[in-house]
Image: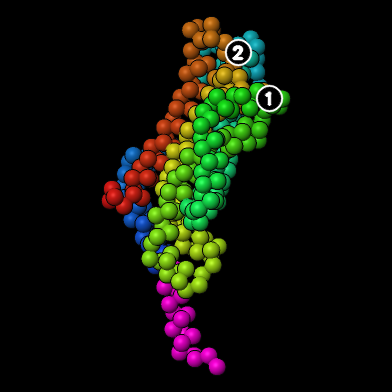
Amino acid sequence: MTDPSATGHSGTQATEPTGESVAEGASLWGEAWRDLRKSPVFVLPVVLIVLFTVIAIWPQWFTDMGPRTCDLARSADPPEAGHWFGFDRQGCDLYTRVIFSTRASLLIGLMVTLGALAIAMVLGSLSGYFGGWLDGLLGRIADIFFGIPLVIGAIVLLTAVVDRGVLQVSGVLILLAWPPMFRLMRSTVLSVRETDYVQAAKALGAGHVRTILRHVVPNAIAPVIAYATVFMGVIIGAEATLTFLGAGLQLPALSWGVLLSSPPARELLNTPHLLLFPSLFVSLTVLSFVLAGDTLRDALDPKLR
C-alpha cells in the first residue's frame, strides 16, 4: 500500500516550483508597474496609445462628418475654421479622413504583432527548451526569413496580390516579421530552462508541455512583450511606407498610408497639409509605441533595476 505521509510529502514538493516561478514573475511585473506609473516617459505615450485606440474603435465620437462626404469644389483647400486639417484632393474633410483612417492602421499593427508574437512564442519556446536538431532546424528557417528586408520583401509579395486589404497586408507582414521576436524568445527560454524551479519541475516528473506552459513561458515572456510594444509601432510605420510606395492598402480602404499616397509629389509644395497631418498621426503613434516599449523593457530588465 502507498504510504500516506510519503504521498503528502511528494505533493508538497511538486507544488513548490510552480509557486516559486509564478511568484518570481508576479514580483517582476509588480516592481515594474510601480516604477512605470511614476515615469512620464511611459505614462504620456500610453495615454496617447489609449487615445488612438478609442479613436480607432469609435471614430464617430470625434467627428460628425462621414469619410466619404466630399465636395470637389473644395479640392485641396487649406485648413480653415471648422475644417482644421483642410480638404484632400477629392474635397473630403481631411480631419475626418485621418480620424477614420486610424482603425485600419492600428488594426494592421495589432494583427501583425499578435501573429508574430504567437509564432515567436510557440517556435521560440520549442527551440530554446528542446535544443538539438529542432533548435537548428527552426533557427535556419528563421535565418532565411530574417535575411529578407521587411519592406522590400513585402513589396515583392504584395505586388503579386490583386486585392490588397487589411488581411492580405497583415498576412504578408506576419510572414516576414516574426524572426526577431523568435530569436528573443528563444534566447530568453534558453536562460530560463536552466533555473532551479524548471529543473525541479522536471525532476518531479512534470511533462514537457506542463513545464513549458507553467514555468518557462511565464518567466520568459516579459522581454518579448516589451519588444512587441516597440514592434507594433514599427509595423504601423511599415504599413504607411508600403502604402505610400503603392504596395500596401488600396482604395476604398482608408489608412494613414492611403492618405499619404494620395497627393502627387508635384502638388505637395502648394498643399503641404495633405502630407503634414497624416504624417503627424503616424509619427505620434509610432513614437508612442517605441517610447512605451523601450521604457517597459528597461523596467523589466533586472540588470537595470
How far across and down, in percent of the image, does residue 38 sit? 31, 47
Q: Nearer the viewer, residue 143 or 106?
A: 143
Q: Helix or strand or loop: what does disc 1 sit on?
A: loop
How far across and down, in percent of the image, does residue 178 sit? 53, 40
View extreme (right): residue: 162
Question: What residue is pinned by disc 1?
Answer: 160
Q: Residues within 10 Å of mark 1 (few under 14, many from 20)?
A: few
Q: CA distance from mark 2 to mark 1?
A: 28 Å
Q: Nearer the viewer, residue 5 or 275?
A: 5
Q: Helix or strand or loop: what does disc 2 sit on?
A: loop
Q: Residue at x 51, y 35 (%)?
A: 146
- What residue span does the magenta drawing correspond to? 1-18
Residue 12 lies in the magenta stretch: yes
Q: Classify 77 as above or below 210.
A: above
Relative to 37, 190 lies left or right:
right
Residue 252 lies in the magenta stretch: no
**Splitting the image into 4 quarters, where does residue 158 fall?**
top right
Relative to 96, 291 lies left or right:
left
Q: Classify 74 as above or below 131.
A: above
Q: Residue at x 38, y 37 (%)?
A: 291
